[in-house]
Amino acid sequence: MALEIYEDSLYGQVLPLDWDDDAVSGIVILVDGEEEFLVENNENGEQLIDHIDRWVTAQGIITESEDEYRIKIRNYKLEDEMDYQSDDDW
């Protein structure tokens, strides 16, 4: 498989990939419970480290090779935000 580079959006769960002592040093976005997209360490990708186990929609540049999928995130939206202040049931 040749190297493919394209722009797309992903919906998935942010999960840790690597640990450095007790801190997360790398993350992936798990899509459909099977495909892992390694998140490149640009500014937007590093912000996602604060959102481990959260669901996101991320837009960016995807690079596919024979061995891995990578995403360089341009922007993202947290999809499991809850607005507790406006909920009268709480």
Image: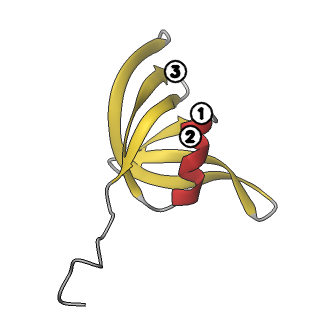
Q: Residue at x 45, y 23 (%)?
A: 61
Q: Foreground mark, 3 or 2? A: 2
Q: Earlier in the sequence, mark 3 or mark 2?
A: 2
| Quadrant where the C terminus is found in the figure | bottom left
Q: Earlier in the sequence, mark 2 or mark 1?
A: 1
Secondary structure of the residue carrying numbered label 1? loop
Q: Residue at x 48, y 53 (%)?
A: 14
Q: Residue at x 36, y 47 (%)?
A: 77
User: Residue 50, position in %: x, y?
Assistant: 57, 58
Q: Foreground mark, 2 or 1? A: 2
Q: Residues within 10 Å of mark 1 (few under 14, many from 20)?
A: some
Marks 3 and 2 sit apart, C-alpha to C-alpha, by: 22 Å
Secondary structure of the residue carrying numbered label 2? helix
User: Which mark is on residue 66?
Assistant: 3
Q: Earlier in the sequence, mark 3 or mark 1?
A: 1
Eyeballing the image, is 77 above or below 24?
above
Residue type, numbered disc 2:
Gly
Q: Residues within 10 Å of mark 2 (few under 14, many from 20)?
A: many
User: Residue 87, position in %: x, y?
Assistant: 20, 81
Is residue 27 among what the camera can see? yes
Is disc 2 in contact with disc 1, using a CB cutoff of under 8 Å? yes
Q: Residue furthest left?
A: 88
Marks 2 and 1 sit apart, C-alpha to C-alpha, by: 6 Å
Residue type, numbered disc 3:
Glu
User: Residue 37, position in %: x, y?
Assistant: 48, 37
Q: Which residue is mark 2?
A: 45
Query: In this rendering, would 51 be left or right of 86?
Result: right
Q: Which residue is mark 1?
A: 40
Nearest to the observer: residue 33 or residue 57: 57
Count of residue discs? 3
Marks 3 and 1 sit apart, C-alpha to C-alpha, by: 17 Å
